[in-house]
Amino acid sequence: MNNSCHDKLWTWDFILLVLATTGIGFCNYFFFTTLPLYAQGLTGSTSYAGLMTGVYTIAAMIIRPFAGILSDKFGRIKLLILGALICSMMCMLYNFASLLIVLVLFRVFHGMGFGMYSTCQGAAIADITPKSRLAEGIGYSGLFSTVALATAPGIAIFIIGNGEMQNFRFLFIIASFIALASMILSCFVSYERNNKALICRKIPYSKKESVNRALPKTLLGFEYAVFLPGAVILLMFLAMSSVTSFILLFAMERNFGNIGLFFTVNALGLFLGRLLLGRIADRRGADIIVIPSLTVLAMLFFLIPFVNSRLYLFMIALPLGLVQGGVGPAINSLMFKICSEERRGTVSAAYFSSVDLGLGIGSIIFGCIAATFGYCFVYWGAMVLSIMALVIYLIGVSQKLNETGFVNIKY
């Protein structure tokens, strides 16, 4: 019998984490569109605009494994608070970045703060969410970040107005106080203080206990079990980078006009995917979400080069969002379930690092493909990557889980 409906998800700690994460999400998405403009104002050149996003993403990716290991050893909440504090400080210090090199330095530290916070937040959500509702809980957590993704850039652009420096300074101050509020909310997350069993990783085992509870071997700090699911996420986000980085250029080449609605519809699909599909994954297993979703994703990428109107492009946007909103939480919860509870921090780091690598490397690879072969091959290449992700999942993840009987476990 499945008792998932009796397992409480919306605890006080869960609500605090979701609210705090939403605040950090706003501070993250405020600057993807506006900080390149700020850099252009400092230097008078557009050549450094991409640097703002690049150094931020790389810094976040580098810090994640260390944040995961430290959170497993010392607990999540301290690092959550530290990460939010760093984000708040860097947002305020942007006001004093009068040179490009100083702005880049602050951007690197901001990326480190965000990488630390998001990694530990993912592990903390896994700590406090009932196993029977893990994909659902992860989906809800990401749901509010989707709201930030959909609204923060527009709010930031409204605040900076005509791009005067004082408007940017107002944006930096607002972002700093939002991050500070997230830090304060994180201070009230009490599960580690109240339940010592959840932080038993702090307590050294005796020799007898260490024999009985030997943890799996690791590679670069990650348990082997995370690599195949992580590869699925990496390949999926490699494919998705073709949309995030090039769909606007593709539409311009086809003379589709303004496709702003594409991103709104895509965000709606992402919202619905996180809202609805995580619950199904918890009750029926990850296969029922991941296998059809990756199949549909490959089909969508195959069809994009044949799109000949803005309407058809908008029709593709919704299922693209649904797939991403369904597969991400399903795989993330699966990674938490098949790895040791003592290493949830590194599991979270592995998941988010796969996302970062996929989006970062994919943009570079597809940029070269677009320049050489055109946008049709960009999306057909994304189709191949989606098929590879599906094959790895079928052979390396789903089959092995079925052989061990894990997917039949009822919580």
Image: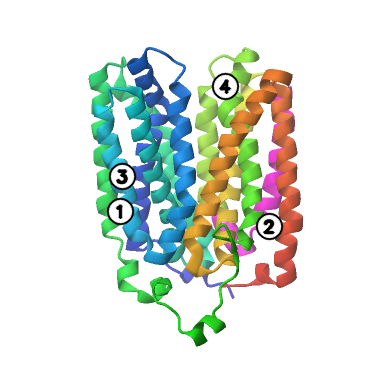
- Which label was assigned to residue 86? 3
Q: 10 Å neighbourhood of mark 4: few (<14), some, or many (≥20)?
A: some
Q: Which residues are magenta?
A: 278-307
Query: What residue is pinned by disc 4?
Result: 248
On the rendered structure, is 316 left or right of 159?
right
Tag 1–tag 4 contact (CB < 8 Å): no
Q: Element at badge 2?
A: helix
Label 3 – label 1 distance at C-alpha: 9 Å
Q: Earlier in the sequence, mark 4 or mark 3?
A: 3
What residue type is disc 1 on?
A: Ile
Q: Residue 56: image x %, image y %?
A: 43, 36
Q: 10 Å neighbourhood of mark 1: few (<14), some, or many (≥20)?
A: many
What residue type is disc 3 on?
A: Ile
* Residue at the image point whose x is 54% and y is 69% from the top: 340
On the rendered structure, is 337 left or right of 288?
left
27 vs 82, nearest the viewer = 82
User: Which quadrant holds the N terminus?
Assistant: bottom right
Mark 2 or mark 3, whichever is nearer to me: 3
Query: What residue is pinned by disc 2?
Result: 287
* Residue at the image point whose x is 29% and y is 35% from the top: 91
Q: Earlier in the sequence, mark 1 or mark 4?
A: 1
Q: Earlier in the sequence, mark 2 or mark 3?
A: 3
What residue type is disc 4 on?
A: Leu
Mark 1 or mark 4, whichever is nearer to me: 1
48 vs 293, nearest the viewer = 48
Q: Residue 267: image x %, image y %?
A: 51, 36
Look at the image and say whether residue 59 sits in the magenta stretch: no
Query: What residue is pinned by disc 1?
Result: 81
Q: Element at badge 4?
A: helix
Tag 2–tag 4 contact (CB < 8 Å): no
What residue type is disc 2 on?
A: Asp
* Residue at the image point whose x is 54% and y is 79% from the top: 213
